[in-house]
Image: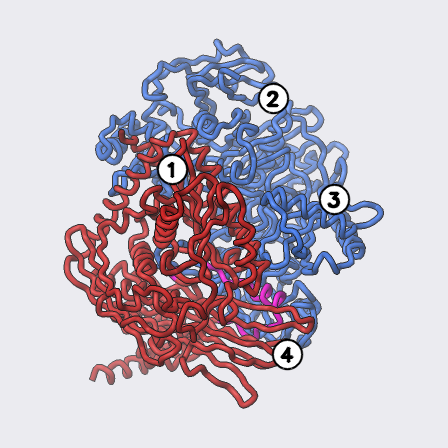
Chain colours: A blue, B red
Amino acid sequence: MGDAAYVIGVDVGGTFTDVFVHDEKSGTVSTVKVPSTRGDQSKGFIEGIGSKVEDFASIRTVVHGTTVGTNALLERKGARTGIITTEGFRDVLEMRRRDRPTTWGLRSHFEPVVARRDRLEVSERVLADGTLLQAVDADEVRRQAHALAEAGCDSVCVFFINGYANAANEQQAVEAVRSVWPTAYVTAATEILPEIREFERLSTATLNAYLQPIVSSYLDRLQDGLRQRDFAGDILIVQSNGGVMSVDTAKSYPVRTALSGPAAGVIAAKAIAEAAGFDNIITCDMGGTSFDVSLVAENEAALAPQTAIDFGMVVRTPMIEITTIGAGGGSIATVDVSGLLQVGPESAGSDPGPACYGLGNDRPTVTDANLVLGRINPDRPIGGKLDRLDVEAARHAIATHVSDPLGLSVEEAAEAILRVANAKMAGAIRLVSIEKGHDPAKFAAMPFGGGGALHTGALIKEVGLASALVPRFPGVTSALGCVVADMRHDRVQTVNAMLGTLDAAELGREMVAVADATEALVRRAGIAFERIDRLYEFDMLYMGQTHTVAVSVEMPETGLTAEAMSAAFDAAYTEAYGRLLDGIAIRVMNYRVIVIGRRPHFDMAALAPRDGKPAADCRIGTRRVYVDGAFHETAIYERLSLAVGETVAGPAILEQPDTTILIDPGLVGRVDEFGNMIITSTGS
Amino acid sequence: MTVDPVTLAILKGRLEQIADEMDATLFRSAFNPIIAEAHDASHGLYDAITGDTLVQGKSGLPIFVGVMSFAVKAVIEKAAERGGVHEGDVWIFNDPYDGGTHLSDFRLVKPVFRDGAVFCYLASVGHWHDVGGNVPGNYNPAATESFQEGMLIPPVKLYDRGAFQQDIVDILSANSRLPTSLYGDLNGQINSLELGEKRLHALLDEYGAETTREALATLRTRAATMMRACIDQLPKGTFTAEDWLDNDGIVDEPLKIALDMTVEDGRLVLDFTRSSAACRGPVNISRATTVAACYVALKHVFGDVPANAGVLEPVEFRIDPDSLLAVTAPKPVGGYTETILRLIDVVFQAVAQAVPTPAMACAYGTINALSLAGHRKNGARWVMFSFFGGGHGAHGAGDGLNHGNAPISTATIPPLEILEAAYPVRFTQWTLRPDSGGAGEYRGGLGAVYEIELLEEQADVFLFGERGKYPPRGVVGGGDGALNRFHYQQDDGEHRPPMASKMLGIDLRRGQRLRLETPGGGGWGEARNRDPEAIAADVSAGFVSPEAARALYAVVVDENGIVDAQATAALRMREVA
């Protein structure tokens, strides 16, 4: 390991596997994009690394953002899984929280990932205050486990009602199951999430069990494949919370990888922005069918306590909060019967894709509008899938479906499509910023993925954002995120006690003990940290409420006090709702302990252009581009050739293999010292 | 001046976002779970002159879409009598005869001024935990006058030109069993209105009042156009449906809800004149509520129509003023949820006759408002109040959803662990109910079985439900869902309420249990046309018993889901003969 020099980030997406190689000795980086290998992602993974690094023994760490778990959930290709539960509650998973997927129209259906015949009950009961009403019978548990194994279940989840308040019965049952279960795949619900709310806990634990055989065997193949190439370093996996975990932790808690890939992208965006001096950004990832935004305020990515992967598939673990709306390059524009122009949520995706792909869709999309207006180069499509784009097909689609019904020219109609799409994206940005109490004028938009940089100028104007920051390699952002992510573990425990009567000092000691144990887990990963941070939080609420407020507290040497907790709650509640409610008792629902191992700093200067050219020398021609109601003869630049400090005034188009950037009239772009393109108003 | 189509589309989104954000603010800060968890609340923007709905939030309770405009109209009329509206005023009231629904729903209405005149009204409605009356939680099945259902507050000023009227809050608090909850919810609603006003002003600063007003008018016209286009998809003619309420809780006689739906060119007539007369008990509703319920039903059928007043322009209502669908004070209306669910059922049934393929069968059709109330050892009062779920109807493309929420709401049920942590009860069962979904080519979704045991010394139990005698209907030849059933234990054994699903003041003791078995949805299409594989899967899952498979589907199958093809053929042969 003495010569080990490489830290490698690998992001496996549906189409491409992106590899980001950082040579710590020389301080250089390189990237490569190879096709993903469906069926066994580890092949493309290893080939991708192999194309950049000959000697795998020289790799110190491989960090991986994976979609194996995400895809297994979305495509429902997890293992056959059984559930052993409290008598009377076999249907908790299927009954959900008595919801429905859409407000209007009662035409929905739900199929839980565990069939009813594989959900078995045992006699046992714990009450809400932790009282053991009926002990569990280990023999009965073993009988049910046998029945599930014989029926063909590969994985099993044990879940008892009120297990969060007293896990004794559940733990005994888990031991009984493990004593007879033919595989290592036994999930205990309270080990995954010792938090009140039965459906959310069971759903999370069940999905963990459902994923475990798939994700574990994938990670085994990955480890074996790397070892065969003499790799002797560590493998880390990106979690949905934006932190990494060891490969062993990932095998025990695969559900934490549910949003691994997208989380890595946000982490990279945060790191790039921080280096460039931007503390507040809104990331914008525009794909074929969706537009994903997330918010980073004062260098912290916003976390959501839970998310639904699909209707009824709830995962309750902290995740990078990503808000998705149906507005992507493939979103279809229609005029409804009342004459109103709509864009999305219906999408042509990437197959058949926009009309200009010529693969069978003849309805206009956002990409078609960009093409017709000259914003995309038809001879240089990004992504490398097609040789050229069919402008006439795009024109025809817009003429038929939008121009004619609205009485507009094709260009006017195309611009209208973009304005409606931009307004939807602006709405998503408002949702994560203004609605959460943030002033958009303090934020910069950071587009990554292929399509976002065409729209950022419009978003700056529409939402009143300060600027936009287009990273140098927007197409490999997630792989970069793997390299810079910290190690992070989130722990939660339901307390459910009144602040006025609980023993704060004792509670504080318990939290410190949990933090100690978690820190030991972090240290066991064997990788270097600059330092280890601990965060302590409570979920608190006024008695009678059901929604909690997240309250951060310090943990002083002298111990935790109820007064300090109360003051912290007042501050958090005031910030959330503006007014306190005097005289109402305060309840403590959960505590949270977060341990973060800060990994060594990655110097973003490694990404900077080394021998850039003046802007005039990067100009590769002009094109007629339609902006603000008229065609402008617009200069086209080779983006990656621009030297640090060069500026380009709008209207201008910047091209590079993985994205196209539009600088609108009235805006100007400048290359910063890291190679990012910073776009601002000419005035500022 | 007309607004260009692009600005129009953008403004539509921006205005909806304001209403949505008002919804979200109240859900997060409300005290009582009926708002916080069940989202029994709504927000919107309403016309400055007529009170008509301009824009409504998407996440609030569907039934409020349409009923809220009546509330704003009531405030406009009252204000005209009392010296007009002023900047900084906020009106509050819960009069159901003016504002629709029932006494539990408190409405706050605030004028937004622009350039010295009212630009529009913002309104917030939320279901409060307890508003007095004879029954905690206010579902009083024995009420014969609204006075027994709770306090009735006419439109009064909560803020007068910006000055907060603490007197009003004192009166409200003194009339509730749960004043803290009331105070918390009221604050949440004020927060929402303040936020909505701030957001609206920002939008008006950006786009100008004139453009925005023009856009709102255009959106209304377009909604009417869209609704006419939807109506024109239905075949012309009159389609008739009748359904029943079990009783009114006082007199054990069924009440008829009859609809004659006539489709004409770009026009729909909903004629309810053959429905029963006003009744003594609390299943009456006001005309405002009837109109709003039909709007909900139509929006389930035609999902794309927008949420503004234009939608009802092409719809004509014929409602007898003496019927139970158009009552005035003080006729009791506390159980309005049951009646509007039946209205939705008859609309679904009439539509199914007109166009079978996109049609939906009836959902479980009862809210099952169950409350348990008592005192803890330390004397503190507790009230556990919740609604329970059931099956959705099957539809032309698939089986109904198991354990869904009511068509009039998007409410979720509180987690049972939260209920057990908050109240002295434990659930002994929380499962799907076999054989409750109506048989059909597509099967109705399953209802649920909830069994609850009391852990304290004593509690009084109240239930307000329906579908105990008349099951949720199937359509297009599909079978009915199972009836609602309620049992409660007493020292001398198990009992069922004389009024099937309505009862007050059941004296429950420690260790005794309640058992609520909720209906499934109706089926769609002939049961004989159901795929035998699907029947076998239903039996193996325990959704359908082998006995029911034989009786309803004429399929002989064992409990493991193995079909006996020979016996099935023989059975079907016999039945044909």
Counting labels gives: 4
Is mark 4 in CB contact (under 8 Å) with mark 3? no
Which residue lies at the image location 36% right of the left edge and 57% below the top edge? B98
Asked if disc 3 and disc 2 are in contact, CB closer than 8 Å, the reply is: no
Q: Residues within 10 Å of mark 1 (few under 14, many from 20)?
A: many
Give the vertical position of B249 relative to A23 (above or below): below
Which is more foreground, mark 1 or mark 2?
Answer: 1
Q: Which residue is mark 4?
A: B457
The three-letter code of the residue at mark 3 reads Arg
Say which residue appears at 30% left-offset and 33% top-offset.
Answer: B5
At x 48%, y 64%, the residue is A94
Tell me whether circle 1 and circle 3 mark residues in contact (CB < 8 Å).
no
User: Which mark lies nearer to you, 4 or 3?
Assistant: 4
Q: Is disc 4 in the same subunit as disc 2?
A: no
Closer mark to the observer between disc 3 and disc 2: 3
Labels 4, 3: one chain? no
Is label 4 or label 2 in front?
A: 4
| Residue B119 numbered tag | 1
As displayed, is residue A262 above or below residue A135?
above
Q: Which residue is mark 3?
A: A534
Q: In this picture, which residue range is highlighted in magenta?
A: B407-431
Identify the amino acid type marked 1.
Phe
